[in-house]
Amino acid sequence: MSAAEASPVEELSDTVLAQEIELLGDMIETVATTDHPLCQAEIDRALHITPPSGEAAAGGQAAS
């Protein structure tokens, strides 16, 4: 079955796609609720990324 023939429900049953949509939503929500450029640590939190040990305290620089 091609993508054009698939129903919308089948198209969104892809677990990876659903996870990416959720992460994008989390990122948009974080950006919308801040009044400053996000630092790398804030971006990582929005994307549910855990930094490697030893790097957690190094956050705080604005991401470019």
Image: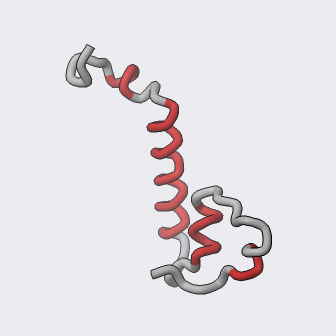
Does 17 sit above or below residue 45? above
The part of the image, by quadrant, that contains residue 59 is bottom right
The part of the image, by quadrant, that contains residue 53 is bottom right
Q: In which quarter of the image is the C terminus?
A: bottom left
Q: Nearer the viewer, residue 10 or 33?
A: 10
Q: In this view, does 18 lie to the left or right of 61?
A: left
Q: In which quarter of the image is the N terminus?
A: top left
Query: Which residue is painted at 51% across and 31% down in the image?
Result: 15
Q: Where in the figure is residue 55, as x and y percent of width and height? A: 73, 75
Q: Is residue 56 left or right of residue 19?
A: right
Q: Where in the figure is residue 63, as x and y percent of width and height? A: 51, 80
Does 18 sit above or below residue 38? above
Q: Nearer the viewer, residue 50 or 10?
A: 50
The residue at the far left in this view is 4
Q: Nearer the viewer, residue 10 or 59?
A: 59
Q: Is residue 38 left or right of residue 50?
A: left
Query: Which residue is painted at 45% across and 37% down in the image?
Result: 17
- What is the count of numbered marks? 0
Q: Where in the figure is residue 27, as x and y percent of width and height? A: 51, 61
Q: Is residue 11 left or right of residue 20?
A: left
Render colour scheme: secondary structure
The residue at the far top in this view is 1
